[in-house]
Amino acid sequence: MKPLPVARLRQAEEIFITSTAGGIMPVTRVDDAPIGDGRPGPVTGRLLDLYWRKHADPAWTTAVD
């Protein structure tokens, strides 16, 4: 795996990061420059919707006491 240059990020239409605890997190700015139109993009929105649907489904979650 190679490092991803910041210049490539600035050219992106949309960016998101993801983690087990955080889910899908849109990235709308890099070094104070907007990504795309500065709002979460359609792919990120769709993934967020799907993530929360699965999160609410007991077949896909495990309760933590």
Image (tube, rainbow, N blue to C red):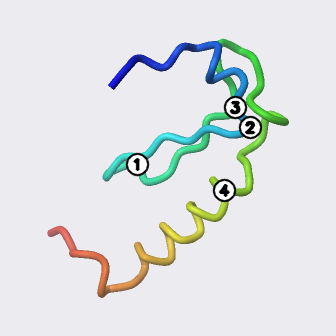
Q: Is residue 38 above or below residue 63?
A: above
Tag of residue 54: none
Residue at image coords 22%, 75%:
62
Residue 13, image x, y percentages: 74, 37
SS for tag 1?
loop
Residue at image coords 53%, 45%:
25
Residues at marks 3 and 4, CA–CA distance in whole angstroms: 12 Å
Q: Is residue 17 above or below residue 2?
A: below
Judge left or right: residue 46 versus residue 4: right
Residue 63, image x, y percentages: 22, 74
Where is mark 2, residue-wise? 13
Counting residues from the start of the chain, the first of labels 2 and 1 encountered is 2
Where is mark 1, residue-wise? 22
Residue at image coords 73%, 49%:
41
Tag of residue 12: 3
Q: Residues within 10 Å of mark 4 (few under 14, many from 20)?
A: few
Q: Are marks 3 and 2 in contact (CB under 8 Å)?
A: yes
Where is mark 4, residue-wise? 43
SS for tag 2?
loop
Counting residues from the start of the chain, the first of labels 3 and 1 encountered is 3
Quadrant of the snapshot with the N terminus: top left
